[in-house]
Amino acid sequence: MSGEKDLQTLLKSMKPEHKSGDYVFCKVQKLENLNLDEIAMIFREDEAITLILKKETADKLNLEYSVVMSWITLTVHSSLEAVGLTAAFSKALSDHEISCNVVAAFYHDHIFVNKKDITQAMKILNSFSN
């Protein structure tokens, strides 16, 4: 199954779920000596390797980060070819001055917002299903 493509269906059925824990974005040059089971997401860029992981893991590894974030997963299985989903929810969040960092994986979209904004962000995202 390739996932849902219809924007209205996606918005009404995205069912955001707040994943417990505090998450941070860190950068490293190499993955050696890291327990990959402790890392939620990895993305290789030209400048460095970005890690998304729990704050306590980053602290244990003495990794630097600038902001503590909360992780929201849109539980609807969205197609990688869906058009407009990211634009719709990012616009709604930005209208309330909430920054979001989005990772689209095979099954779901994952949104990282500042920890202080999680309650408002969940309210905004849940409003799409009303």
Image: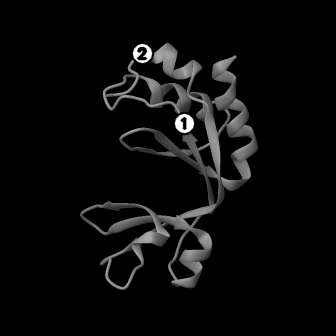
Name above or below for residue 22 compared with residue 56. above
Say which quarter of the image contains residue 17. top right
Percent of width and height locating residue 24: 55, 64
Disc 2 marks a residue whose amino acid type is Asp
Percent of width and height locating residue 129: 65, 20
Disc 1 marks a residue whose amino acid type is Leu
Say which quarter of the image contains residue 4. top left
As drawn, is 50 to the left or to the right of 63?
left
Residue at 65% in and 39% down: 97
Name above or below for residue 124 compared with residue 51. above
Residue at 68% in and 55% down: 115
Question: What's the CA distance linking mark 1 and mark 2?
Answer: 15 Å
Residue at 36% in and 85% down: 33
Name above or below for residue 55 compared with residue 82. below
As drawn, is 62 to the left or to the right of 97?
left
Q: Which mark is residue 30?
A: none
Instruction: Answer with mark 1 or mark 2, whichever residue precedes in sequence.
Output: 2
Residue at the disc numbered 1: 74
Count neighbours of disc 1 (C-alpha within 10 A) and say few if under 14, some if 14 to 19, many if 20 or more: many
Residue at the disc numbered 2: 6
